[in-house]
Image: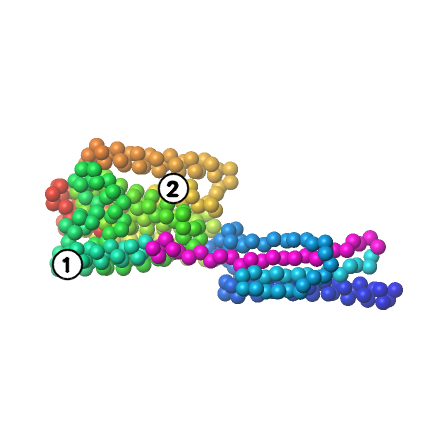
Amino acid sequence: MANKKNSKEKSERSFSNSILGTLGILSKNKQKTFNQEWDKFTSFQKARSIINHQEDISLEFLAEDLVNPTTITENETDVSVDVPEMDSEDSQPRPKTQILYEEPVIRRPWFIIFISIVHIIMLCVEIIKNKGFQSFSVNPWFGPSVSVLIDLGAKYEPKMKDGQYYRFVTPIFLHVGILHLLMNLFFQWKGGKQLETTFGIIRTIIIYFVSGIGGVLASTVFLPYMLQVGPSGSLYGIFAVLFCDLFHSWKEIESPRLTLFKMILVIIISFGTGLLPSVDNFAHLGGFLTGTFSGLILLPNIRLRKSRGILVLISFLFLGTYFGVGFYLFFKNANALSSCKFCKYITCLPIKSWCDSVDIPVGHEKTDIE
């Protein structure tokens, strides 16, 4: 009896050690992959995306006897736990448990990389077409002339009214100069990379262009007499989606208040620069609004349980109303500022002559930077 009892205790210890060894291997493998201890994952962007979208863990129970020991390959870990038979009459032989762990695929921000390269190429085309840079007094952003921007597709209402509707899209790819490009590339990489690596390329493309077109449309309705180039409507849409994600995952993110403070600070600084001459806050606001409601429709983790369907419906209604009313005002040649006198102060400060460019007539357009 004593030998039988010792054999049973030895078997139980062997089983416990096998389980602990298995967990240790998996934990070590995850720690090596993500450069962070598994039990210290607190960031939503890392842990939630790994758990919900990328990790594939399957348990397969086999009715065979002892097989191969633990093997580790480059892309997966195959862990075999050998469980001996118990001596108790009531106990049944436990099958071997095989845990298959596949390492998650790390998403690359291919779209953000691609669109950034396009922006750089287009600025080079602008400079070549302009045969150099304009003087600092004409373009302090180190870029081309206004006529070159018009030729390459800037928002220019007279040509848009003549049927060049592609100008609702092409301003997204243009910049007024090198400084303008560098500033937007920085924010595009910071925000766009986070969005695409977390939620994927398709959602990012849709949000990027819906927000960009929404920003151009708002600029066309409120500032029809100003030229406009730049992707800041798209960038504001990206930041709007990240705001939604932050509030939805507040309890899952490490230091959410600090993250919120940083995001609000970026928005305040960017909106403040929009009060300077020739910078368009209406494009910023339009991109932020359309980005918010696009995110509520597209992002898989933004759910309010039973309210999910209502939230999606409201978002579709808002976007439909936004674009419907916007294009109606555009084709009716309506200038929203004529009906809303104070609205112009959203994009300029009433000091010196900063708001003069908002009211200039067609034929005397100035460049509007996003």
Residue kind at label 2, given as amino acid type: Phe
Q: 353 or 175, which is in the foreground?
A: 175
On screen, residue 220 versus residue 116, left or right, reads left
What residue is shown at x 55% (from left), y 57% (from top)? 102
> Where, by quadrant of the figure, is residue 125 drawn?
bottom left
Q: 320 or 265, which is in the foreground?
A: 320
Whether residue 248 appears in this view of the structure is yes
Q: Quadrant of the N terminus?
A: bottom right
Tell me the element at label 2: helix
Asked if residue 343 is positioned above or below residue 81 in the image, the reply reads above
On screen, residue 84 versus residue 339, left or right, reads right
The tag earlier along the polypeptide, 2 or 1, is: 1
Kindly report the distance in space between the C-alpha atoms of the residues bearing marks 2 and 1: 42 Å
Provide the residue designation for mark 2. 293
Percent x, y for residue 369?
A: 22, 51
Write the start and end of the magenta stretch as one range: 89-114
Q: 12 or 39, which is in the foreground?
A: 12
Residue kind at label 1, given as amino acid type: Lys
What residue is shown at x 78% (from left), y 59% (from top)? 85
Provide the residue designation for mark 1. 131
Colouring of the image: rainbow
Q: How many marks?
A: 2
On screen, residue 56 versus residue 221, left or right, reads right
Asked if residue 38 is positioned above or below residue 235 in the image, the reply reads below
Whether residue 259 appears in this view of the structure is no
